[in-house]
């Protein structure tokens, strides 16, 4: 048995797979996000650890006792700042925090290597500008920093006592020489940091610590090895077989991501496309990233007054695709690809006296689909061809939403059995490789196909004018534009 732990934004998921890759058990524990000021998004690192313990303890004891290795996946970019006692100096600043836009501009202009070596525009979501913000606004905390860790690697520290990260997650800090797969002295120095404050680096398939004896006893496990693991999107890719050049997925979690595996480093910062290391050796990947996806569904469910995502999907289905003029701009937390705009915010347009909750629900599903289509256009503009997308994340549970997504993106969507398990499955597979060897192509093979959704030409035709209106709406709602 192999255990994968995914430190997400809304919760921690633990999944145990057997040697054949089938899910034997899983557990979940919820997390909350704190937003003490506009643009801020934070979590207490100790909450990750408590939720990890709860998720694992919810798995049957006999299955836990059979675990031979553990892999970690997690939300990327979170700045976890530790002092000399290895305790957090402040709440972690998360991936969807937008406070550091001024620092982004300064870093991007002063250090071209962020785009050339780091491969990406400096955006508020990344870790580097968060540290620049702390240096400017919380100098006492900055001076006390001994180590900077990413969320999953803080959990690793609690599990093993080791400060280690993998290359896919670390690439999202903007301090990595992504082509060379190592820390960059120049990029760290631009933020007033050094390699001594960074964790050691390993590939996602390498061993990266051993479970501490006291934790092993608490979890009814042996002192098993912990694999390097990966950032949530890279681990999710490993979980569903996106492990060869040109393989692609769409993740419908809190954020939305289109992920394409590459055999080489292919940066395209001009269109806000992310280019990172994969969690597998000798592979890289490109991503179009949208800060709000399934989170829009949860938000809209609360707004309309239905119980949750399933009821929101059912509500939207009563309206049907493009059956109203309403347009939703899904920028609840700003946007990355292709706009790189931390200050943009969501909105409804073209509501009228006939607007109903059902039509609003449908417009939310369409708005997220249109944003993902913007991201896919940016990837295509970088020369990346995508003909089909494997779908993972909580949004993968809705085939109805899939019909809108397939038509808006004009690609076939492939739904895999167990695809909603996502990054935790990939983390478990990385743990399996770490102890048993085997090629990623074999161990990380795609699960069986559950069903496919091809683009419906009729829905695509009906969505086309709304997509055009969506594209034209963005510049009209930016804070820099007078309405």
Image (spheres, rainbow, N blue to C red):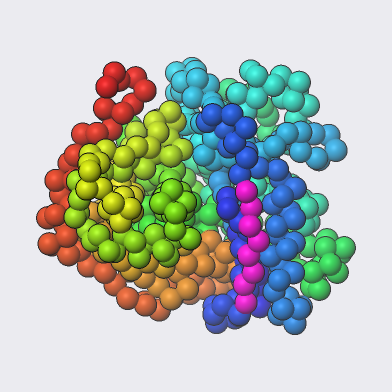
- On screen, residue 125 versus residue 200, left or right, reads left
The residue lying at 33 percent from left, 68 percent from top is 399
In the image shown, does 231 or 300 lie closer to the viewer?
300
Query: Is 429 contained in the magenta span?
Result: no
Point out the image quarter for the C terminus: top left
The residue lying at 53 percent from left, 26 percent from top is 100
Point out the image quarter for the N terminus: bottom right
- On screen, residue 62 versus residue 329, left or right, reads right
Quadrant of res 388:
bottom left
In the image shown, does 435 or 1 lie closer to the viewer?
1
Relative to 110, residue 328 above or below: below
Q: Position of residue 289 (x, y in %)?
A: 41, 45
- On screen, residue 373 versus residue 74, left or right, reads left
The number of numbered discs placed on residues in the rendered structure image is: 0
Q: Position of residue 78 (x, y in %)?
A: 60, 41
Q: Position of residue 32 (x, y in %)?
A: 62, 48
Is residue 142 visible in the rendered structure shown here? yes
The residue lying at 52 percent from left, 31 percent from top is 39
Q: Please tell me whether the stretch drawn in magenta is mainly helix, strand or loop.
A: strand
The residue lying at 78 percent from left, 56 percent from top is 160
Span shown in magenta? 25-32
């Amino acid at each position: 048995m192999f255990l994968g732990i995914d430190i997400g934004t809304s919760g921690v998921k633990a999944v145990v797979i057997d040697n054949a890759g089938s899910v034997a058990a899983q557990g979940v524990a919820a997390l909350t996000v704190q937003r003490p000021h506009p643009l801020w998004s934070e979590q207490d690192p100790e909450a990750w650890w408590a939720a990890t313990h709860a998720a694992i303890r919810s798995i049957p004891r006999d299955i836990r006792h059979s675990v031979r290795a553990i892999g970690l996946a997690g939300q990327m970019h979170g700045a976890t700042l530790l002092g000399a006692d290895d305790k957090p100096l402040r709440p972690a600043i998360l991936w969807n925090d937008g406070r550091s836009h001024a620092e982004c501009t300064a870093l991007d202009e002063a250090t071209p290597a962020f785009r050339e070596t780091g491969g990406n525009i400096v955006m508020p979501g990344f870790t580097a500008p968060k540290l620049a913000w702390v240096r400017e606004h919380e100098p006492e905390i900055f001076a006390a920093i001994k180590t900077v860790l990413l969320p999953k690697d803080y959990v690793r520290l609690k599990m093993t006592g080791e400060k280690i990260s993998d290359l896919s997650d670390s690439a999202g800090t903007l301090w990595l020489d992504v082509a060379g797969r190592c820390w960059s002295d120049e990029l760290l120095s631009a933020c007033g940091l050094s390699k001594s404050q960074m964790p050691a680096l390993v590939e996602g398939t390498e061993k990266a610590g051993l479970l501490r004896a006291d934790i092993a006893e608490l979890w009814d496990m042996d002192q098993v090895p912990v694999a390097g693991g990966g950032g949530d999107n890279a681990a999710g890719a490993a979980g569903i077989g996106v492990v060869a050049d040109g393989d692609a997925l769409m993740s419908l979690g809190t954020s939305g991501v289109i992920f394409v595996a590459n055999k080489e480093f292919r940066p395209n910062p001009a269109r806000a496309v992310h280019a990172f290391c994969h969690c597998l050796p000798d592979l890289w990947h490109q991503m179009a990233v949208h800060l709000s996806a399934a989170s829009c569904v949860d938000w809209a469910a609360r707004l309309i007054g239905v119980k949750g995502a399933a009821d929101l999907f059912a509500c939207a289905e009563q309206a049907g695709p493009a059956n109203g003029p309403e347009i939703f701009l899904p920028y609840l937390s700003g946007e990355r690809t292709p706009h790189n705009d931390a200050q943009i915010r969501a909105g409804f347009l073209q509501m009228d006296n006939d607007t109903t909750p059902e039509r609003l629900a449908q417009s939310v599903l369409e708005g997220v689909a249109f944003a993902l289509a913007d991201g896919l256009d940016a990837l295509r503009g970088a020369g990346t061809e995508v003909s089909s997308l494997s779908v993972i994340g909580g949004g993968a549970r809705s085939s109805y939403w899939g019909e809108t997504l397939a038509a808006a993106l004009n690609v076939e969507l492939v739904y895999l059995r167990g695809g909603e398990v996502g990054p935790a499955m990939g983390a478990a597979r990385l743990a399996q490789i770490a102890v048993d060897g085997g090629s990623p192509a074999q161990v990380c093979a795609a699960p069986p196909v559950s069903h496919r959704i091809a683009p419906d030409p009729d829905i695509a035709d009906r969505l086309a004018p709304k997509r055009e209106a969506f594209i034209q709406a963005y510049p009209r709602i930016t804070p820099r534009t007078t309405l």
